[in-house]
């Protein structure tokens, strides 16, 4: 599912844009003074407009060229296995210049708080969803958990994949209302999903989108549900997607659980296939499904149970690693070889001490967090 619940916060970051644009705004196009149409439908010139999923179709040319980073630098795929130690290069999205050799992943500005992604001293990520209830009003006065959308986190690769295999090893929060998503997503809104909700931690949802339209052959009834013999919040699990031009396979701990054939998405004449087929970034996200529409809230397992935790601590997912294997490459065994002249980014704050359940194998008390530069 597209992370609609977190887009409002991101839209606020780019409110200074001169005009609106994109599929969200009647397919309107930006002008040359603010040429980049952001993924959220605002025109501007910042990395938050020209980076990420800048909509090149609705962006203006400057000097004969589209300034979206994907167009400017090319949508390149780089294979790597990342455990998020010092060898994995991560920066804030608004510090990214579009050159994928400068960073492996960016922390996207969802909810303004990059403290929602913390990094273990020896690797791993603690991804958190937190609330800031000051001056908020309950959506349902009879329900103490019915706050507006919480602050989430989204981590995006700088690499663009068109076919290949991507995977992650992680543990979910296991609380109602929270959606854990590990997906591929393209500028054209093609999407391949693994999603988990707190409604039932033994059930996982595979899904796909074609040009922003959900499900296709997966959309009947309540969608495809895969039952597991364990809870995803109680143990680390490997979730993979094997994506070729002819099929998509959803894999759990090495076992294929669901498959989609390209031919399944075509019309009766074998034409007009609605199969994800555009270069995509790999993303991990937590978002607040409980604050969404009633149908989304029901799917997510109700409101997030804020009354059972502190708003600042929130609920956590723990990621041990993410792998990206480009089409035709061997399975990666570590991060990519760095081009000459490139150095690791240094946008980290000093170590902070936090007790983090689930990172005991990494040194639970030594964590860093991304420096927030959204003043």
Image (cartoon, grey):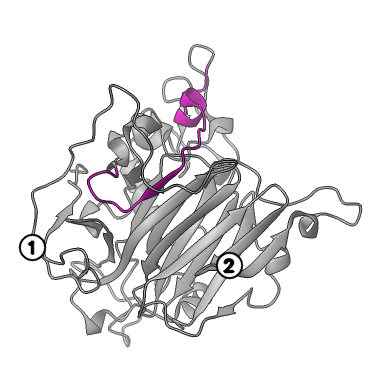
Q: Is residue 68 magenta?
A: yes
Q: Quadrant of residue 18?
A: top left
Which of these two is toward me, 287 or 208?
A: 208
- Residue farthest top in this picture: 63
Q: Quadrant of residue 287?
A: bottom left
* Magenta region: 65-88
94 w.r.t. 310: above or below: above
Mark 2, secondary structure of its residue: strand
- The image shows residue 14 at horizontal and vertical percentages of 35, 40
Q: Does residue 4 show up?
A: no
Q: How many numbered tags mark residues here?
A: 2
Q: Which mark is residue 353?
A: 1
Q: Is residue 130 magenta?
A: no
68 w.r.t. 360: above or below: above
> Left or right: where does residue 231 sit relative to residue 299?
left
Residue at 63% x, 77% y: name it. 222
- Residue farthest bottom in this picture: 142
> Left or right: where does residue 78 sit relative to residue 340?
right
292 w.r.t. 174: above or below: above
Q: Which mark is residue 206?
A: 2
> Left or right: where does residue 268 sit relative to residue 86?
right
- The image shows residue 322 at horizontal and vertical percentages of 40, 54
> Left or right: where does residue 207 sit relative to residue 346?
right
56 w.r.t. 309: above or below: above
Could you tell me what secondary structure mostly forms the magenta stretch? loop
**Marks 2 and 1: in contact by CB < 8 Å?**
no
Which of these two is toward me, 112 or 182?
A: 182
Quadrant that contains the C terminus: top left
Q: Quadrant of residue 25?
A: top right
CA distance separating discs 1 and 2:
36 Å
């Amino acid at each position: 599912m597209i992370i609609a619940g977190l887009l409002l916060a991101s839209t606020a970051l780019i409110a200074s844009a001169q005009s609106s644009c994109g599929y969200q705004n009647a397919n309107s196009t930006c002008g040359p003074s603010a040429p980049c149409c952001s993924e959220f439908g605002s025109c501007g010139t910042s990395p938050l407009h020209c980076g990420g999923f800048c909509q090149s179709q609705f962006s203006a040319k400057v000097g004969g060229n589209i300034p979206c980073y994907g167009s400017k630098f090319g949508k390149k795929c780089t294979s790597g296995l990342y455990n998020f130690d010092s060898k994995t290069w991560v920066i804030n999205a608004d510090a990214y210049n579009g050159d994928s050799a400068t960073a492996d992943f960016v922390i996207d500005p969802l909810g303004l708080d990059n403290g929602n992604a913390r990094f273990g001293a020896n690797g791993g990520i603690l991804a958190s969803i937190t609330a800031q209830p000051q001056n908020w009003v309950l959506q349902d006065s009879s329900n103490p958990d019915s706050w507006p959308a919480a602050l989430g986190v989204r981590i995006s690769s700088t690499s663009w994949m068109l076919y290949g295999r991507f995977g992650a090893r992680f543990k979910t929060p296991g609380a109602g209302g929270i959606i854990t998503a590990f997906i591929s997503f393209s500028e054209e809104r093609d999407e391949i999903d693994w999603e988990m909700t707190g409604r039932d931690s033994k059930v996982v949802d595979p899904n796909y989108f074609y040009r922003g339209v959900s499900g296709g052959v997966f959309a009947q009834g309540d969608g495809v549900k895969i039952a597991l013999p364990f809870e995803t919040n109680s143990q680390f699990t490997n979730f993979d997607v094997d994506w070729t031009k002819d099929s998509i396979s959803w894999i759990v701990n090495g076992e294929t659980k669901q498959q989609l054939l390209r031919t399944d998405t075509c019309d009766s004449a074998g034409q007009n296939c609605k199969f994800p087929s555009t270069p995509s970034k790999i993303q991990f996200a937590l978002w607040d499904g409980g604050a969404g529409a009633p149908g989304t809230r029901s799917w997510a397992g109700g409101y997030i149970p804020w009354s059972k935790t502190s708003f600042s601590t929130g609920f956590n997912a723990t990621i041990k690693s993410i792998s990206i294997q480009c089409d035709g490459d061997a399975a990666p065994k570590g991060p990519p070889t760095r081009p000459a002249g490139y150095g690791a980014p240094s946008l980290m704050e000093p170590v902070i001490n936090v007790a983090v359940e689930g990172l005991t194998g990494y040194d639970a008390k030594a964590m860093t967090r991304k420096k927030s530069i959204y003043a």
